[in-house]
Image (cartoon, helix red, strand yellow):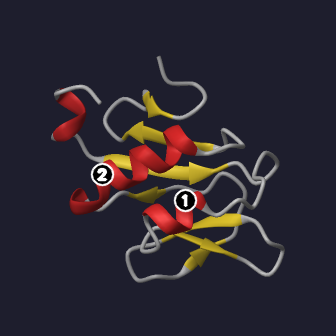
Amino acid sequence: MSAQTGTDELQVWVDQDLCTGDGLCVQYAPEVFEFDIDGLAYVKDHDGELLQSPSVRTGVPAHLRLEVIDAAKECPGDCIHVVRSSDDVEVAGPDAD
C-alpha cells in the first residue's frame, strides 16, 4: 500500500464472474463483503445493504482500508478490485501495479 493510498478515499467492487466463493473477503471485512444465496461475494453499502448489480462499487470505510486491501490481495479468484475514488486507479486487485 502506498503512502498516498492511506489518505485517499477508496472504492471496492467484486467481479462475480471470477468469484470462487472461498470467503476470505467476508472473513477479512464482513462489514464490506457478504455472500448472497448464489454463493458468491458481493459488496455492501454503508447501511449494510447488499449491492447485487454487476460491478457496483461501494466506499471503503477508513477504518477497514487495510482489511479490504488484504482481502483483494489474498483473494484466490482475483475478483476484488480496490480503486482510488479520485482517479479510478486500482490500488489492490488483479489490475493493480
Would you say 10 lies left or right of 36 here?
left
Residue toward you, 24 or 47 = 24
Mark 1 lies on a secondary structure that is helix
Q: Which mark is residue 25?
A: 1
Q: Residues within 10 Å of mark 1 (few under 14, many from 20)?
A: many
Relative to 69, say whether 57 is above or below.
below
Q: Is residue 67 visible?
A: yes
Q: Could you say which is closer to the camera, residue 49 or residue 1?
A: 1
The residue beneath circle 2 is 65
Q: Is residue 26 above or below residue 65?
A: below
Q: Position of residue 89 (x, y in %)?
A: 43, 27
User: In screen coordinates, is 52 left or right of 75?
Assistant: right
Q: CA distance from mark 1 to mark 2?
A: 12 Å
Q: x%, y% of residue 62?
A: 22, 57
Residue at the spot 54% in from the left edge and 42% down from the top edge:
74
Inspect the image, locate mark 1, and give the three-letter code of the amino acid beneath it: Cys
Q: Residue at x 64, y 64 (%)?
A: 23
Residue type at mark 2? Arg
Residue 49: % across, % down:
52, 82
* Viewer-side residue, 28 vs 5: 28
Whether residue 81 appears in this view of the structure is no
The residue mark sitting in front, 1 or 2, is: 1
Q: Position of residue 35 (x, y in %)?
A: 67, 74
